[in-house]
Image (cartoon, rainbow, N blue to C red):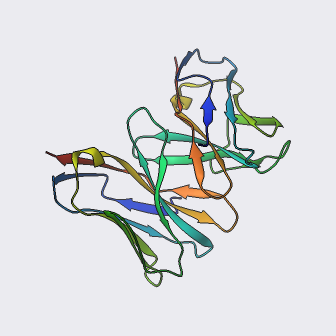
């Protein structure tokens, strides 16, 4: 079974903090994605990566950056967290079909 | 700009009834149309998918109907069960691998 593991299930941070969300996959997939999920808006793509050290902006990249130093690990970085970044963050890996982690519910106070 | 429009936002169906969720898309560059099912506390998981050269795909109680000319596709859940209560997302994938999601439909099946 494909396993996509997100490091934290719940996270509470303060406005202005730098936040790291970690994601690891065990299926040797080249493609990895970060989405955020908000009620009524579905899943919106923040960034994706199709290879180590490669990254592409998704539909809502503002306020975020990513890092992919190893094939199995894709990190999402909130440079200076703001309250409008309170959301559920979902990581996925893919060789065609998306496989999602269980998500990180981030609250920015 | 929402490239995949999904309706309804929420749906209540009696046990044994048919659940129908509709989606419409605009971009003809999409080459794959999956549906994902999400239970509380879990990430979405692939339920069923269709390619645009096929008009219908059935897997057990789940059927996708696809109308390429109208740029619409729908999910039908036959004999709906309380265990089907979940949030359903339609999606469309660009040639390659970038996937765009609809806003989601919360389905509740009454026992």
Q: Going by the picture, which residue comes out furthest to the bottom?
A: B69
Question: Is the N terminus of chain A in the top left, top right, bottom left or bottom right quadrant?
Answer: top right
The residue positioned 13% from the left and 45% from the top of the image is B111
Tell me: residue B59, above or below residue A69: below
When asked about the image quadrant of residue A52, the answer is: top right
Q: Position of residue B86 (x, y in %)?
A: 33, 45
Q: Is residue A70 left or right of residue A26?
A: right
The residue positioned 31% from the left and 62% from the top of the image is B61
When asked about the image quadrant of residue A61, the answer is: top right
Tell me: residue A100, above or below residue A79: below
The residue positioned 67% from the left and 32% from the top of the image is A23
Nearer to the camera, B30 or A99: A99
Q: Is residue B110 left or right of residue A66?
A: left
Q: Is residue B100 left or right of residue B18?
A: right
Q: Report how many numbered discs are placed on residues in the image.
A: 0
Q: Position of residue B23 (x, y in %)?
A: 40, 66
Q: Position of residue B100 (x, y in %)?
A: 56, 57
Q: Position of residue B24 (x, y in %)?
A: 43, 69
Nearer to the camera, A30 or B8: A30
The residue positioned 25% from the left and 63% from the top of the image is B78
Tell me: residue A15, above or below residue A94: above
């Amino acid at each position: 079974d494909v396993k996509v593991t997100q490091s934290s299930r719940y996270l509470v941070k303060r406005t202005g903090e730098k936040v790291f969300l970690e994601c690891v996959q065990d299926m040797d997939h080249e493609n990895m994605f970060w989405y955020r999920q908000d009620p009524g808006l579905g899943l919106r793509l923040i960034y994706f990566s199709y290879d180590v050290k490669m990254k592409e902006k998704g539909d809502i990249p503002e306020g975020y950056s990513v890092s992919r130093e190893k094939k199995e690990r894709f990190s999402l970085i909130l440079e200076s967290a703001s309250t409008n970044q309170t959301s559920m963050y979902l990581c996925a890996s893919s060789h065609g079909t998306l496989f999602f982690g269980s998500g990180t519910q981030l609250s920015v106070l | 700009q929402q490239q995949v429009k999904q309706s309804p936002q929420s749906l209540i169906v009696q046990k044994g009834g048919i659940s129908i969720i509709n989606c419409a898309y605009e971009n003809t560059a999409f080459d794959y149309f999956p549906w994902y099912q999400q239970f509380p506390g879990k990430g979405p998981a692939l339920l069923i998918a269709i390619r645009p050269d096929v008009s219908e795909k059935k897997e057990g109680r789940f059927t996708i109907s696809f109308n390429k000319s109208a740029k619409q596709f729908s999910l039908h859940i036959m004999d709906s069960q309380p265990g089907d209560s979940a949030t359903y997302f339609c999606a469309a994938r660009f040639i390659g691998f970038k996937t765009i999601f609809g806003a989601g439909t919360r389905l509740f099946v009454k026992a």
